[in-house]
Amino acid sequence: MTIANASMQNGRPFGLATASGILTGSVLWSCGAAFGLAAIMAASPWTFELMRYVGASYLLYLAFKAARSVFAEVAAGRDVRGRRSLKAAYLQGIAIHLTNPKVILSFGSVYSVFTPPGTDVGTLLLAVLFLGLQSATVFFAYAILFSIKGVVGFYKRMYRWFEGAFGLVYAAAGLALFLHAF
C-alpha cells in the first residue's frame, strides 16, 4: 500500500524510491534471518517488543497523516508532487519495513523451514539473492503499475476513499501490533 500510495500521489520516481527503501529493508531482514538474527531476537524478547512498539507507533502516525488528508480542505486528488524528496521516500520505505516485526518473523520462518542447520554461506547468500529478486519484482511492479496515467486518474477521482482506506489499514495494523494480534 505504501508503494502504491507513493506512486499515485507523487509519481513513478517516488514509488520506485519507496520500493527501493522497502526492498533494502527486506534484504536486510533476509540477511539477518539467514545469519541468525531471528534466533537472537527470540532469545532477547525486549528487542522484539521494542521493534513492535516502534513499528506500531509509525503505522499509527501514517494512519493519522492519511486521516488528516481525508478531512483536509484541499480538493480531492490534489497534486502533491514536489513536497517530498526521493531520499525521504526511500527512508520512509526502509522505516516501514525495518520496524515491522512480522517481516522478521516471516523471514525467520522461511529460513528455519528451508535451510537446515549447517547450511553453507553460499547457499544462504543464494537464498537472500533469490528472495531479494522476488521482492524487487513485486515492489517495482507496484510502483510502475500505480504510476500509470489511467490508474493515477482513477486515484485522483477516488482520492479521499483511498486515503481513508490506507488510514484504516495503517491504524488496524498499528493497533494489532500494540495488542499482540499478529
Image (cartoon, rainbow, N blue to C red):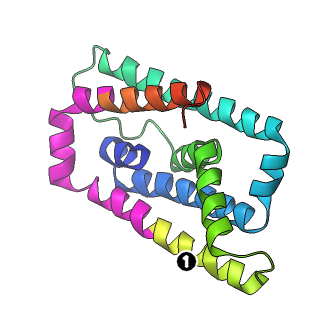
Dot 1 amino acid type: Phe
- 61 left or right of 140 in image: right
Q: Is residue 92 above or below residue 74?
A: below
- 78 left or right of 168 in image: left
Q: Position of residue 2 (x, y in %)?
A: 43, 44
Of 58 and 44, which appears nearest the observer?
44
Q: Position of residue 68 (x, y in %)?
A: 39, 18
Which residue lies under the disc numbered 1?
Answer: 130
Residue at 35% x, 35% y: name it.
Answer: 80
Q: Which residues are magenta?
A: 137-164
- 79 left or right of 30 in image: left
Question: Is residue 78 something that shows in the picture?
Answer: no
Element type at mark 1: helix
Residue at 74% x, 61% y: name it.
Answer: 32
Q: Position of residue 111 (x, y in %)?
A: 66, 68
Q: Is residue 114 above or below residue 100?
A: below
Q: Position of residue 7 (x, y in %)?
A: 35, 49
